[in-house]
Image (tube, rainbow, N blue to C red):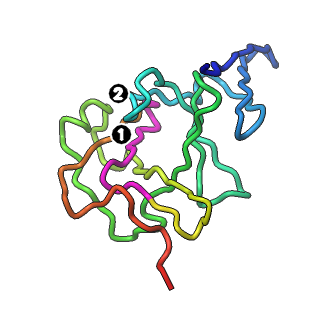
Amino acid sequence: MENTASKQTENKGGKGFMKINSSKLGEIEFKEDDVITLSAPLLGFPDLQDFLLISDDNSYPFLWFQSVEDTDICFILIETNTFFKDYNPSIPKRELKVLAVSDEKEMKIFSIVVVPTDPKLSTANLRAPLVVNFEKKLAKQIILDDDTLMIKTPLFESK
């Protein structure tokens, strides 16, 4: 059975705050302005569209992409260029339009990370990055038409 987020609203100094209880991150307090809406659902998650991007000094350079609708769903992200300095995918103009991006400086590109039992074997999905327009609070996972990019790109070099 799906665990749906129970949103509670509080009034602190006249500003409405909401809370969810994430199964991975615990209680998260946020404002509606913090919510990033997906213009199309992530692959495999057709019913989820509202997320919070959470940065934590303890987990940097990894970020959390927490679903507001299902508190059991939380993805690990990286700013792709942190690990892959030469990563500069060509985002189709139609996708930029969907995200209301008029200048590429308005967007940030993230990759979803899979962390197996041995974290040294973590991989990032470079083929389908998550592009976020923070100004408009819109995001979309974009499947790139570039066969050189892998879905499971190792984050760390094997030794």
Please, what is the dominant secondary structure of the magenta stretch?
loop
Q: Which residue is at the front of the view, 17 or 53?
A: 53
Number of marks in the rendered image: 2
The residue most toward the bottom is 159
- Does residue 125 belong to the magenta stretch? yes
* Left or right of 77, for residue 144: left
What's the CA distance linking mark 1 and mark 2?
8 Å
Q: Specify the label residue 49 is tagged with.
A: none
Which percent across, then down, holds residue 42?
40, 34
- In this rendering, position of residue 97 left or right of residue 13: left
Q: Nearer the viewer, residue 156 or 102?
A: 156
Side (left or right) of 58 relative to 37: right
Crowdedness of circle 1 by 10 Å Cα count: few (<14), some, many (20+)?
Answer: many
Label 1: which residue?
Answer: 141
x 52%, y 50%: residue: 77
Q: Which residue is drawn at the image coordinates 19% and 59% (left, top)?
A: 147
Tag 1's secondary structure?
A: strand
Q: Is residue 81 above or below residue 28?
A: below
Q: Which is nearer the eye, 93 or 2?
A: 2
In magenta stretch: residue 82: no
User: Which amino acid, by three-letter code, is at mark 1?
Assistant: Gln
Label 1 with label 2: CB-CB less than 8 Å: yes
Where is residue 67 shown, x and y percent of the image? 57, 30
Q: Which residues are magenta?
A: 124-137
**Which residue bears the numbered disc 2?**
40
Q: Nearer the viewer, residue 1 or 25?
A: 1
Position above or below: 11 against 155: above
The earlier-in-sequence mark between 1 and 2 is 2
Q: Quadrant of residue 34?
A: top right
Q: Amino acid at mark 2?
A: Ala
